Image: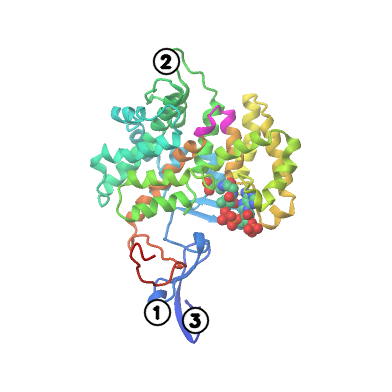
Amino acid sequence: MPNKNATLTIADQSVSLPLVEGTHGPGCIDIGGLYHDTGHFTFDAGFGATAACKSAITYIDGEKGVLMYRGYPIEQLAEQSNFLEVAYLLLEGELPSDAEMTKFEHDVTHHTMMHESVKNFLHGFHYDAHPMAMLCAAIASLSAFYHDTTDNEDPAQRKLAAIRLIAKMPTIAAAAYRYSIGWPIRYPRNNLEYVTRFLHMMFEVPSEPLELNPVVAKALDLLFILHADHEQNASTSTVRLVGSTGANPYASVAAGIAALWGPAHGGANEAVLKMLAEIGDAKHVEGAVARAKDKDSGFRLMGFGHRVYKNFDPRAKIIREMTHKVLDALGVNDPLLEVALKLEEAALKDDYFVERKLYPNVDFYSGIIYKALKIPTEMFTVMFAIARTAGWIAHWIEQHEMPGGRIYRPRQLYVGATPRDYVVLGKR
Ligand code: CMC
């Protein structure tokens, strides 16, 4: 019988800590009783080695570059599935039967409209508001419209909130974009499937029909699959943290959108494109790499590095391959792709990046494809949010279904002033 405990020795005190095994991948040392038993916390800035919850949704092996949703390798899903089926898989844990898929598609399709007052709400923004700001606020506002889905204890309400979020996110995202360019909002056309419907809401004008190259919808669907979930990343952890307080699903997901916006996370795809445009020409790549290595420059290569992947990001591999196909199929000759490829080549053979295992991540190539699909730069992170909504709400539901859930409440290593007495004003 193998030892199911780890022993920790602090000075002359030894404590036995239970080992907990998952179904796949590294197990954990359960330190839940550590403070009670020893008076010590653990210190793990940025949670590099801390599992904050149990989850059965997504598995990552960062050393080997493996990503699986509910046990299915991302490569297989990318090749054979579609975004809405992946959303179902994330939510329900199993691939749907024909009847289940038809019902799910029907449910999502019939919740695509947004309340007319949400439109008015968006119109309160200044025309140059960033669409992520509009999306975040509008999604938070949904709890004020749908009181029938804010009882977190009711499984049917949780499910309906999930459907609403997945259904309305593209509608609100497209509306935010159109408002920013002064176009009338386009209502969802429910005879179209999820991604094509979104593209119509983005690009169709009232005066003429939209001719959509099917390559565009296919590429966007694939990007949505790749972005749909990524275990306990910063935005999903934010959704869970907010969710752990008992906050409603719309407020929890709005918090996830806010977390996603940062350039270290989902905002990287927008930042990559800006960086490539700033570099401008393949001949300036060497200088950019040198600047990224200089810690005083404050500049990092956006789209490089990952907290978990210390090998090629499997999503980046798929997108890299797709980038060439999409650009060829659309007849796009983007000089930024040349800059990107040169940058990738230079970084992959540079000792600084090799030693630190900094590989291109999912955001490095996605921006180039979004650009080829004519998605405006400031909408890149919004695209990520639409896809990640499936993962966020799957995690939020899992958190409410799994027994033993507690409020997320980390501790700290205090480094402030030691105890001192208050001195009244005039005597300081
Ligand atoms: N360019 C230059 N140096 C880098 C980079 C980079 N992109 N990323 C990490 N480093 C260096 C960093 O300076 C540090 O060096 P040293 O050991 O000498 O101090 C070392 O590599 C480790 O970096 P870290 O900041 O401790 O790593 P982390 O795990 O905390 O951060 C990261 C991960 C993704 C935030 C970071 O790599 C980064 O800022 N990358 C650029 C932003 C980006 O592309 N983000 C998208 C992530 S993937 C999609 C998503 O999550 O949304």
Q: Residues within 10 Å of mark 1 (few under 14, many from 20)?
A: few
The Cα–Cα distance between marks 2 and 3, rounded to whole angstroms, is: 71 Å
Q: Amino acid at mark 3?
A: Ile
Residue 40 position, x and y percent, is: 44, 75
The segment highlighted magenta reads 370-379
Residue at the outermost bottom position: 12
Q: Earlier in the sequence, mark 1 or mark 2?
A: 1
Residue under the point 53% across and 44% down: 263
Q: Earlier in the sequence, mark 2 or mark 3?
A: 3
Instruction: Label the magenta part by its dominant secondary structure.
Output: helix
Residue in the foreground of this view, choosing between 253 and 286:
286
Q: Marks 1 and 2: which is nearer the front?
A: 1
Q: Is residue 374 magenta?
A: yes
Q: Is mark 1 within 8 Å of ligand 1?
A: no
Give the position of the C terminus as an image quadrant.
bottom left
Where does label 2 land, which residue? 206
User: Disc 2, disc 3: CB below 8 Å?
Assistant: no
Q: Nearer the viewer, mark 2 or mark 3?
A: 3
Q: Earlier in the sequence, mark 1 or mark 3?
A: 3
What's the residue type where badge 2 is placed?
Pro
As displayed, is residue 398 above or below residue 167?
Answer: below
Q: Which residue is mark 1?
A: 37
Label 2: which secondary element:
loop
Disc 3 designates what residue? 10
| CA neighbours of label 2 inside 10 A, class few (<14), some (14 to 19), many (20+) | few
In this orientation, does residue 307 appear? no
Q: Residue 197: x percent and y percent?
A: 43, 27
Is label 1 in contact with label 2 (beta carbons under 8 Å)? Answer: no
Which quarter of the figure has residue 116? top left
